[in-house]
Amino acid sequence: MTEDSTQPGAGSDSGSYPQGTAPSGTGGTVHPGPGREGADDLVRLVDHHGVRHPNRHYDALVADVDGAALQKLYEDMVVVRRIDAEATALQRQGELALWPPLLGQEAAQIGSGRALRSDDFVFSSYRENAVAYCRGVDLADILRVWRGNASSGWDPYTINMATPQVIIGAQTLHATGYAMGIINDGADSVAVTYFGDGATSQGDVNEAMVFAASYQAPVIFFCQNNHWAISEPVGLQAHVPIARRAPGFGIPSVRVDGNDVLACLAVTREALARARSGGGPTFIEAVTYRMGPHTTADDPTRYRDANELEDWAARDPLARIATLLDSLGLLGADYSDAVKAKADAVAAELREGCLSMPEPAPSDVFRHVYSEPNSWLERQQDHYERYLASFAPAPQEGTR
Ligand SMILES: Cc1ncc(C[n+]2csc(CCOP(=O)(O)OP(=O)(O)O)c2C)c(N)n1
Ligand SMILES: [Mg+2]
């Protein structure tokens, strides 16, 4: 695949949409911004050959990203890929019930996640484990739910990130409501909500955009278009690029190469600055690809072409930054060894945290339903405990 074929209007970026409706023209963005030829153009600062392209508008937003900062972004991506691989292995070994891999989406999540301030608040789906990493989550906490150990992984206020939402798109409403609260508080923090291409078909997401625009709420809608909603390709539900929908709600939008960590950082910083200064919401469509299965319970070979995966593997988000670092003389053996050692250490910590998680008592399931005592629930708990006790071995003759 040539670089040209990844440009909008050609190749598989546009191939996701039905023939004849490929991205083109200038109609997709309320504020196209200087440096972008048309509203549907992908913002891309580092191409998949690892070549850094100057950009009149977005360069200023990442001017502080020197070699060391680029190395840090690369390290983050290597580490979260390792976390993802380790969690997948834990699931395959029977230690987790399920795992939703993020393989291929590291740049979208690290680029956006590293743009945030600690007082911003994230509302995500189940796949944003790299964003949780950026927020400083305790590693074992990202596995707790998937191990069936707790109904929720962490206290949202410790890292200013709500626990993962599995009801598709619901978190966009939570983020918008939170952002309306930020206005009432007179604060300059921002709510950021992550969701997938499939989620944009949900009423919740559309309702959230209506409210966000009406109240000019400081919220970022960060859509990771990974091309699939389980087995449904994005082209089925989106006959034009998803980013084009937002201006219809009065929300400026931007399409970014979701496999370019630097571009994702730049567009998120721009959206954050807009929100902090009273400019309201922004919709970001990060065009990326889910290289793994939907979850470990899914088999994508049943519904997608192996060639598609091959095309996207050539645009791997980590490989392009590795190539860029190498061309800058910043991918030496010492640095590479240190990154690998860090990823191994994080993976070991994750595994240890998973295996050493205390098993909850079966009746703990009743503990966090209501904050106040509830007689109905107490009766159910009592019934359940007596039921469990019925499995206790009967006392043997002569042992009384
Ligand atoms: C309201 C609702 N409807 C359906 C589902 C079942 N479901 C789980 S994941 C998923 C696909 C979501 O696709 P997308 O939004 O693109 O996110 P991705 O999984 O690709 O990150 C669906 C339909 C659900 N969890 N919630
Ligand atoms: Mg998707």
Image (cartoon, rainbow, N blue to C red):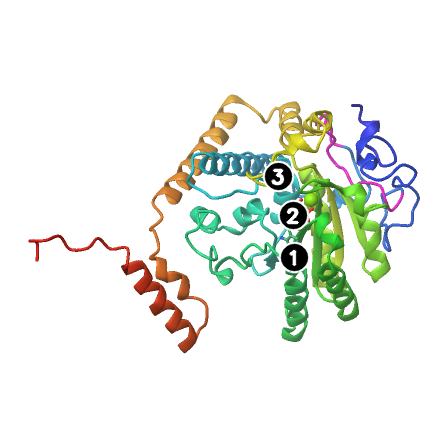
Three-letter amino acid code of the residue under disc 2: Ser
Please indicate, yes or no, whether residue 372 appears anywhere in the rendered image.
no
Q: Is residue 20 left or right of residue 254?
A: right
The residue lying at 24 percent from left, 55 percent from top is 392
Which region of the structure is painted magenta? 38-52
Q: Is residue 260 above or below residue 191?
A: above
- Dot 1 corresponds to which residue? 192
Three-letter amino acid code of the residue under disc 3: Glu
Using the image as rendered, state which of residue 239 and residue 174 is in the foreground. 239
> Looking at the rendering, in which quadrant would you find the C terminus?
bottom left
Q: Is residue 205 left or right of residue 125?
A: right
Q: Main secondary structure of the magenta part?
A: loop
Please indicate, yes or no, whether residue 225 appears anywhere in the rendered image.
yes
The crowd level at tag 2 (other Cα within 10 Å; few <14, some 14-19, many 20+) is: many
Q: Secondary structure at mark 2?
A: helix
Q: Quadrant of residue 379?
A: bottom left
Q: What whole-number distance in Å separates the C-alpha atoms at marks 1 and 2?
A: 9 Å
Q: What whole-number distance in Å separates the C-alpha atoms at marks 3 and 2?
A: 10 Å
Three-letter amino acid code of the residue under disc 1: Val
Q: What whole-number distance in Å separates the C-alpha atoms at marks 3 and 1?
A: 17 Å
Instruction: Tell me whether circle 1 and circle 2 mark residues in contact (CB < 8 Å).
Output: yes
Q: Give how far across and how far down residue 266 sits, in percent.
A: 71, 46
The crowd level at tag 1 (other Cα within 10 Å; few <14, some 14-19, many 20+) is: many
- Earlier along the polypeptide chain: callout 1 or callout 2? 2
Q: Give how far across and how far down residue 33 sits, in percent.
A: 85, 50
Using the image as rendered, state which of residue 87 and residue 237 is in the foreground. 237
- Dot 3 corresponds to which residue? 106
| Residue 17 highlighted magenta (yes or no) | no
Q: Give how far across and how far down residue 113 sits, in percent.
A: 61, 48
- Earlier along the polypeptide chain: callout 3 or callout 2? 3
Instruction: Tell me whether circle 3 and circle 2 mark residues in contact (CB < 8 Å).
Output: no
